[in-house]
Amino acid sequence: MIIVQKNKSNKVAALLIIVFACLFTFCKSDSTSSGGRGINNGGGVLNDQDYAIQIYDVYNEKIIGPDTIYFANDSLISWGSIAAGFEMDGYEVDEGGDSLYFEALTVSPSLPATMLWRGIVIGNRISGEIDMRKDEKRTLYYSFEGHLIE
């Protein structure tokens, strides 16, 4: 019981990531069925929105630090990713009720590596995960959460 209490915040964070991944997968697969949510390839749904986020290293259980992401010209843009050599690209949105699920792939030709961003926006809150791969193997796995900058 003491071990559970000691690592409770880590277990809660891991559980939230798993729940988020399941919800995102369900919503993506549901969007192709009749009556499902529609996927919007960019389309400006999130354009002109800036978010202050905090990034966490899931594997090493530590805070990486703050970043700002924004959606503009149908692209997800992360200042931290740009500084690391990644090129920003378009995003897809799956609209579901009060939630917007998004996915974007960024590429760094110099590494070469990719970062897959998956997230959800509910009201003025944003959260999600970043899966970085080099040579098709996962090298980093981050989660993030934040809020709309008004």
Image: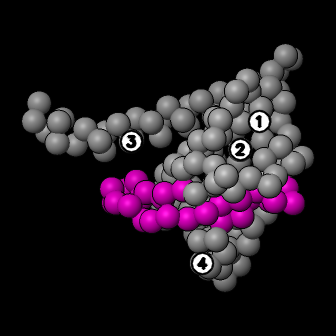
Question: For residue 130, which quarter of the picture?
Answer: bottom right
Question: For residue 95, which quarter of the picture?
Answer: top right
Q: Look at label 3 and name its amino acid.
A: Ala
Does any portion of residue 131 appear in the rendered image? Answer: no
Q: What element carries label 3?
A: helix
Mark 3 touches mark 4? (CB < 8 Å): no
Determine whether 76 is above or below 46 in the image. Answer: below
The numbered mark at residue 114 is none
Overall secondary structure of the magenta section? strand
Residue at the spot of label 3: 13
Looking at the image, which residue is at 89% across and 46% down? 43
Q: Look at label 1 and name its amino acid.
A: Asp
Does any portion of residue 110 appear in the rendered image? Answer: yes
12 relative position to 147: left or right: left
Farthest top residue in view = 35
Distance between the alpha carbons at the discs numbered 2 and 3: 20 Å
Residue at the spot of label 2: 102
Query: Where in the figure is residue 26, as x and y percent of width and height?
Result: 65, 27
Residues rendered magenta in the picture: 53-78
Query: Where in the figure is residue 30, as x and y percent of width and height?
Result: 74, 24
- The quadrant the N terminus occupies is top left
Residue at the spot of label 1: 94
Distance between the alpha carbons at the discs numbered 4 and 2: 22 Å
- Label whose residue precedes the other's in the sequence (1 or 4): 4
Q: Between residues 30 and 81, which one lies in front from this camera angle?
A: 81
Mark 1 touches mark 3? (CB < 8 Å): no
